[in-house]
């Protein structure tokens, strides 16, 4: 591969970045096949494609992390004026143990040198000013590992925008909006538009096709490592985009009619409190799917960890299947038939160095353990193969390390590992984060199936459409407390968002495209 600064003449007409004819092979797999990508200044280009289609691999080649086997990448300009690439990867690249200030302060702070006594204060106010662009207030002194996913995304974006020498750069965002709620996405999009208006090129990777249609000037679609479309965003409709991504026509996501009568009270929690959550009541019967909605900081993203016992909590009553459960911990929760698919799959979802097979069987080895405690390898292999098939994990290689699967395929493996034991209580946080449109339908079907088999399901999601599609009832949280519970005809995307923001009477459904599609799926 060559990275060539082109001649500076006619810089305006030159793309800021041009990748041409990129080929990348991994052992036994061609991840990219003759892929080209051009980005002009001022342009927002969406890069979309199913899980494993090659998006992250292309980004890593542009960044020089991987070397392409064939092809070239060129940046406009020379010397200091050469366009540079700033990338926010799926895992954000932050140091979890360091604070926002320290993560942002990893580079030099303008106007601050050496060990000047004002350095700490200057770094803090510089960090605050960077974060303020996103209209988001949170504690910039605590380790970023303790921030919510959306807050971490904001830190990563602020860091990427910090210290640009000139605006003619390319900013790549690899699925930045997956855990963001509608208003947070709006903030992110206005930041992206501002960056583009200043002359930068922006590449936006997302599985949320409605968002792609909202923001993109141009859409490039990868399928199985090849570019299958490179088209203007204007005039492109949702169905056409789905067809490009999947190679098949768009399927309506229709909620099935669950025939199971609601069973026993499986979850009976009163007055649950913990960090950022106050006195929440949650009752879920066997066969019922209950959702939790709310904006960033509402407590929506903390609640699942409190219920599973991975964060400390207090409660007036905490009964599972009619039995009091007071000394809560993740291990004890698994023994009592609770399963938790966390939103943050990089930190909690799977063990990166272990294979898909080992990750899948880890939570419960009983089905694959022989009489003397040894692992029955054939049974373990059969189980893993079946699950990779069922969840359409690509490639369906049970021995491949978890870290070597694409982000969405990692999510499918995490899902398979927890659902295989038919849990009594299934707790899901952002269950389809980073998952492509086909796998999303498969995961919805698995959630429906788990409820149909009698599981009590709790789904915490930033995606209002997803909650409307999946849930019988949704609790809306704001500032750590439950402010509404919506069910039946009241359970619409607009009402979820209205209650989530405390705008119950003032939001028009047409003000936000992400909330204007009520009733499509029920
Ligand atoms: N280091 C690696 N070793 C082997 N195979 C890899 C490696 N990295 C990626 N792959 C494979 O290359 C293909 C493309 O993966 P990539 O991560 O680029 O997909 P993606 O389009 O970003 O997917 P997602 O939407 O799920 O993030 C996948 O089949 C993946 O398993």
Image (spheres, grey):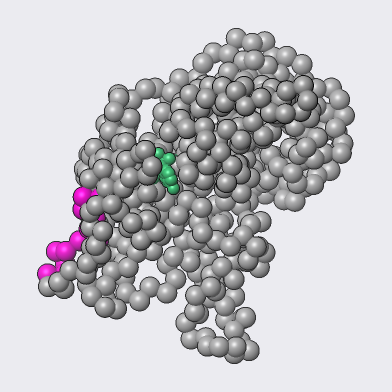
Residue 361 % position (x, y): 64, 31
Q: Is residue 340 left or right of residue 506?
A: right
Q: Is residue 70 left or right of residue 95?
A: left
Can you see residue 2?
Answer: yes
Q: Is residue 302 left or right of residue 68?
A: right
- Residue at left offset 61%, top offset 52%: 148
Give the position of the N terminus as an image quadrant: bottom left
Q: Is residue 328 left or right of residue 419?
A: right
* Relative height, residue 93 to residue 451 (above, below): below
- Residue at left offset 47%, top offset 82%: 110
Q: Residue furthest left?
A: 10
Can you see residue 294?
Answer: no
Q: Quarter of the image holding residue 203? A: bottom left
- Residue at left offset 30%, top offset 64%: 200
Magenta segment: does it hold 13? yes
Q: Quarter of the image holding residue 262? A: top right
* Relative height, residue 371 to residue 49 (above, below): above
Q: Nearer the viewer, residue 382 or 33?
A: 382
* Relative height, residue 75 to residue 304 (above, below): below
Q: Nearer the viewer, residue 481 or 341?
A: 341
Residue 53 % position (x, y): 35, 39
- Which stretch did the figure color magenta? 10-22
Residue 67 % position (x, y): 33, 56
């Amino acid at each position: 591969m060559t990275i060539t600064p082109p001649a500076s003449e006619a810089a305006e007409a030159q793309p800021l970045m041009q990748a041409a004819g990129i080929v990348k092979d991994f052992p036994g797999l061609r991840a990219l096949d003759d892929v080209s990508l051009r980005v002009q200044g001022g342009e927002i280009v969406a890069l979309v494609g199913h899980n494993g289609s090659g998006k992250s691999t292309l980004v890593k080649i542009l960044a020089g992390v991987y070397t392409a086997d064939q092809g070239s990448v060129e940046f406009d300009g020379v010397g200091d004026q050469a366009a540079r690439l700033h990338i926010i990867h799926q895992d954000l690249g932050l140091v979890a143990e360091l604070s926002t200030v320290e993560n942002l302060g990893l580079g030099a702070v303008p106007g601050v040198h050496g060990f000047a006594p004002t350095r700490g204060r200057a770094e803090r106010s510089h960090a605050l000013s960077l974060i303020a662009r996103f209209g988001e207030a949170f504690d910039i002194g605590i380790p970023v590992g303790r921030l919510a996913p959306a807050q971490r995304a904001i830190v990563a974006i602020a860091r990427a925008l910090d210290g640009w020498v000139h605006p003619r750069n390319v900013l790549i965002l690899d699925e930045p909006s997956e855990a963001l709620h509608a208003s947070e996405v709006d903030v992110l999009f206005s930041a992206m538009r501002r960056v583009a208006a200043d002359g930068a090129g922006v590449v936006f990777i997302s599985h949320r096709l409605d968002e792609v249609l909202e923001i993109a000037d141009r859409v490039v679609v990868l399928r199985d490592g090849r570019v299958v479309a490179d088209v203007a965003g204007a005039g492109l409709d949702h169905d056409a985009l789905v067809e490009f991504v999947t190679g098949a026509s768009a399927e309506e996501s229709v909620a099935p009619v669950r025939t199971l009568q609601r069973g026993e009270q499986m979850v009976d929690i009163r007055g649950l409190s913990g960090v950022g959550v106050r006195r929440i009541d949650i009752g879920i019967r066997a066969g019922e799917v209950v959702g939790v909605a709310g904006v960033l900081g509402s407590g929506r993203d903390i609640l699942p960890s409190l219920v599973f016992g991975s964060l400390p909590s207090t409660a007036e009553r905490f009964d599972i299947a009619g039995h009091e459960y007071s000394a809560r911990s993740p291990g004890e929760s698994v023994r009592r038939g609770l399963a938790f698919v966390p939103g943050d799959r990089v930190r909690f979802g799977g063990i990166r160095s272990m294979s898909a097979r080992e990750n899948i069987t880890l939570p419960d080895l009983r089905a694959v353990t022989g009489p003397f405690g040894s692992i029955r390898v054939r049974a373990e292999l059969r189980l893993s193969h079946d699950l990779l098939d069922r969840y359409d994990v690509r490639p369906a290689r049970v021995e491949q390390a978890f870290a070597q699967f694409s982000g969405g395929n990692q999510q499918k493996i995490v899902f398979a590992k927890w659902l295989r034991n038919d849990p009594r209580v299934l707790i899901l946080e952002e269950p389809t984060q980073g998952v492509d449109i086909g796998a999303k339908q498969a995961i919805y079907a698995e959630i429906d199936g788990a409820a149909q088999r009698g599981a009590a399901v709790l789904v915490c999601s930033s995606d209002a459409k997803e909650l409307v599609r999946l849930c019988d009832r949704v609790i809306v949280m704001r500032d750590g407390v439950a402010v509404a519970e919506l069910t039946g005809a009241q359970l619409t995307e607009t009402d979820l968002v209205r209650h989530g923001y405390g705008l119950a009477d003032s939001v028009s459904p047409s003000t936000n495209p992400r909330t204007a599609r009520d009733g499509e799926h029920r």
